Image (cartoon, helix red, strand yellow):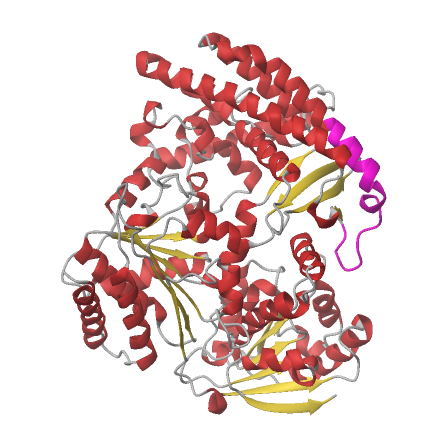
């Protein structure tokens, strides 16, 4: 078939689904988006390129689809139809669990019911979301003295002498053993399937980590539990699925790991794509703990003992690598405190919150010369240590093949090393990035140190991160992708795609097309934007907050149904809550005081009962929250949601722009704020029948030039200006 025939067939499938869905409203914007998806995926040339062949054709569409367009059907129906025609698969990646659940439990089953052939779809999760039955078996039996326990590895400083067991510590060990035994019983009885997310009460990370399935401690098909492994059972479902739903973190972390289909031979959809750049930065950032180093000796001891058992010659170098690695990191810690101690020992920054680490950033990304030597040594000896561990792992896998009767014992030995190997790899990655120098004209990595205290112990960490997410995505993701659609309600910033394309690594890419599809909502009729202009300047935090809270409380007194108040700082929210009059206190639900699900359920119950209900929330409540109809008739934005001014990666990027004679506020801060503000405002009108008022108490929205740019990126509400 030709590309045009594939596209036509995919669009016909979309139209057939729309026509056969009872009560479904045909939307022109949705059809335009489906058309672009079909056209894009039909042009992508999939499959491995042979040597000497021309460069395969790539096609990438960036589609902003306003609220109410129905974008999940607009991309899934044509993409799946094309994949079935072409004998390939679809990967849908999202940023939030809520959208993943919506796709897997609602949208895809509904679509499958209208297709002519069966559709198999599955949710992909990282290995660490599943239990390792071998680890659980050992921990439930209480035989975790050397394998699986992480408390001694990651808790107290290794330099602290081991204390004799106390009654309290024995009680803690017994409680953990009882907890793991209950998990093992639930697994054996079939009341639990081994997925952390399906436990009735998901455990805290410190309780889950010792039993989590992890790549470094997994022997795969050599494990005696392989035939019963929850993770590999899920992998079989993924292999059989025609549509795989994942998240951006998993997509980026599994590049090259063969967990998901090869990106040059599948159709990739990135929903909630405005999160992709920030996900990339967090994915490719690294850090190293310079204080708690006892794990190095523990890993060396285990590696030597196990290496001798399987007769690995490379273990001869381990004592030297371990000793010199530890010495290098100790030197780095001492020198970092000599150079940056004054900043790190200073009182926490105003507004940063009690108990948070202090920070010192390396200017211009150039690590001072005294620190280059120890971090260079750390990178060298971590690499040598890693090579020795690889030799031991290879020997263990070989021994499992040759002596299957010993597989259980050998798998446990493999896991003993695997429990600590990720720390060693993290040291290697961080030391390399910390000592890397940017080529002429390139942007250097952001580098910084943090110091945190817990009781009498202090922890010094070194951090490094790429500064431009687009570069990382271009190198690691887009170089492998043939066909992709990126979509969200907020991709254009201030009415333009330029900022997102730069951040996502797609600027200047000839394979990229853009499309903006308007919402079907009648915003001027359905919504009013009330711009309250305070007398106090927003930069005068104390005076502004006092005046803003007074105006907010006056407006909240008029709320008759559901309302959402979005704050830009915890101090703002604390102040507003403290000043609530008695009449309003019972109507307010504060983020953090109840689990999110319970808070939203209570909000819905109150509104359904005809009572006013007001949610106080922060950034995480500003997107992904669906409160249609009376659940959110009033939305209050206390201040423009600029990013915190002390983000070290943002600081490093601004420093680089200023050095190049450019304006970071105009190039970075305003476009990023425009996307965030559009997400916040998007909580107000969710259906064609909604009516809502949006209040903004930051006069910069209507009194500044950049405020006008922000307004241009918002829905065209009826604007009402109000003097303070």
Q: Position of residue 423 (x, y in %)?
A: 58, 31
Q: How many marks?
A: 0
Can see residue 553? yes
Q: Position of residue 273 (x, y in %)?
A: 45, 62
Residue 411 quadrant: top left
Give the residues drawn in magenta, as a range.
330-354
Along the viewing direction, whichever of 562 and 496 lies nearer the viewer: 496
Q: Position of residue 529 (x, y in %)?
A: 58, 86
Does the segment drawn in magenta span residue 678?
no
Q: Say which quadrant the N terminus sits in.
A: bottom left
In the rendered structure, the answer to whether residue 580 lies left or right of residue 528 reads right
Residue 538 quadrant: bottom right
In the rendered structure, the answer to whether residue 55 lies left or right of residue 144 reads left
Q: Main secondary structure of the magenta part?
A: helix
Residue 407 quadrant: top left
Q: Is residue 561 above or below residue 40?
A: below
């Amino acid at each position: 078939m030709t590309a045009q025939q594939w596209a036509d067939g995919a669009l016909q499938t979309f139209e057939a689904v729309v026509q056969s869905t009872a009560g479904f409203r045909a939307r022109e914007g949705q059809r335009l988006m489906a058309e672009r998806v079909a056209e894009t995926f039909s042009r992508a040339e999939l499959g491995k390129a042979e040597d000497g062949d021309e460069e395969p054709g790539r096609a990438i569409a960036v589609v902003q689809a306003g609220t109410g367009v129905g974008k999940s059907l607009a991309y899934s129906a044509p993409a799946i139809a094309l994949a079935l025609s072409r004998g390939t698969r679809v990967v849908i990646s999202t940023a939030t669990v809520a959208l993943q659940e919506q796709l897997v439990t609602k949208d895809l089953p509904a679509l499958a019911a209208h297709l002519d052939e069966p559709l198999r779809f599955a949710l992909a999760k990282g290995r660490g979301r599943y239990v390792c039955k071998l680890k659980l078996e050992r921990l439930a039996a209480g035989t975790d003295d050397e394998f699986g326990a992480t408390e001694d590895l990651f808790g107290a400083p290794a330099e602290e002498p081991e204390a004799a067991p106390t009654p309290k510590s024995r009680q803690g060990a017994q409680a953990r053993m009882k907890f793991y035994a209950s998990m093992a019983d639930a697994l054996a009885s079939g009341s639990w399937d081994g997925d952390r997310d399906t436990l009735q009460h998901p455990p805290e990370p410190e309780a889950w980590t010792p039993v989590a399935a992890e790549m470094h401690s997994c022997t795969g098909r050599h494990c005696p539990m392989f035939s019963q492994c929850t993770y590999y059972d899920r992998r079989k479902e993924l292999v059989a699925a025609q549509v795989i739903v994942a998240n951006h973190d998993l997509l980026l972390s599994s590049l090259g790991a063969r967990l998901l289909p090869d990106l040059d031979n599948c159709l990739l959809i990135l929903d909630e794509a405005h999160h992709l750049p920030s996900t990339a930065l967090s994915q490719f950032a690294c850090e190293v703990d310079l204080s708690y180093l006892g794990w190095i000796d523990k890993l060396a001891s285990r590696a030597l003992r196990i290496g001798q058992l399987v007769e690995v010659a490379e273990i001869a170098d381990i004592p030297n690598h371990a000793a010199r690695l530890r010495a290098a990191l100790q030197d780095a810690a001492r020198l970092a405190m000599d150079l940056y101690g004054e900043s790190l020992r200073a009182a926490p920054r105003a507004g940063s919150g009690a108990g948070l680490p202090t920070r010192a950033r390396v200017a211009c990304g150039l690590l001072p010369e005294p620190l280059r030597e120890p971090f260079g040594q750390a990178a060298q000896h971590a690499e040598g240590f890693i090579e020795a561990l690889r030799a031991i792992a290879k020997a263990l896998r070989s021994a499992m093949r040759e002596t299957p009767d010993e597989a259980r014992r050998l798998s446990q030995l493999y896991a003993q090393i695997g429990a600590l190997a990720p720390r060693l790899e993290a040291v290697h990655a961080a030391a390399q990035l910390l000592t890397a120098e940017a080529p002429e004209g390139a942007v250097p990595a952001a580098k910084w140190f943090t110091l945190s205290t817990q009781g009498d112990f202090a922890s010094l960490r070194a951090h490094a991160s790429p500064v431009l997410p687009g570069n990382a995505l271009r190198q690691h993701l887009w170089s492998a992708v043939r066909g992709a659609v990126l979509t969200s309600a907020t991709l254009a910033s201030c009415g333009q795609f330029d900022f997102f394309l730069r951040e996502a690594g797609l600027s200047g890419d000839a394979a990229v097309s853009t499309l903006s599809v308007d919402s079907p909502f009648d915003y001027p009729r359905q919504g009013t934007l009330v711009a309250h202009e305070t007398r106090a300047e927003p930069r005068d935090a104390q005076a502004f907050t006092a005046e803003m809270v007074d105006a907010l409380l006056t407006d909240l007194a008029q709320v008759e149904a559901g309302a959402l108040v979005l704050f830009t700082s915890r101090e703002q929210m604390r102040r507003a809550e403290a000043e609530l009059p008695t009449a309003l206190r019972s109507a307010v639900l504060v983020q953090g005081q109840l689990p999110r699900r319970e808070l939203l359920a209570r909000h819905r119950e109150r509104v359904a009962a005809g009572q006013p209900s007001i949610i106080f929330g922060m950034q995480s409540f500003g997107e992904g929250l669906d409160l249609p109809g009376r659940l959110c008739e009033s939305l209050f934005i206390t201040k423009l949601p600029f990013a915190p001014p002390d983000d070290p990666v943002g600081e490093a990027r601004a420093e680089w722009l200023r050095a190049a004679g450019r304006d970071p506020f105009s190039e970075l801060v305003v476009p990023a704020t425009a996307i965030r503000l559009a997400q916040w405002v998007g909580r107000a009108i969710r259906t064609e029948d909604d009516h809502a008022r949006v209040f903004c108490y930051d006069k910069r929205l209507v009194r500044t030039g950049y405020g006008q740019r922000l307004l241009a990126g918002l829905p065209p509400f009826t604007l009402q200006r109000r003097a303070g």
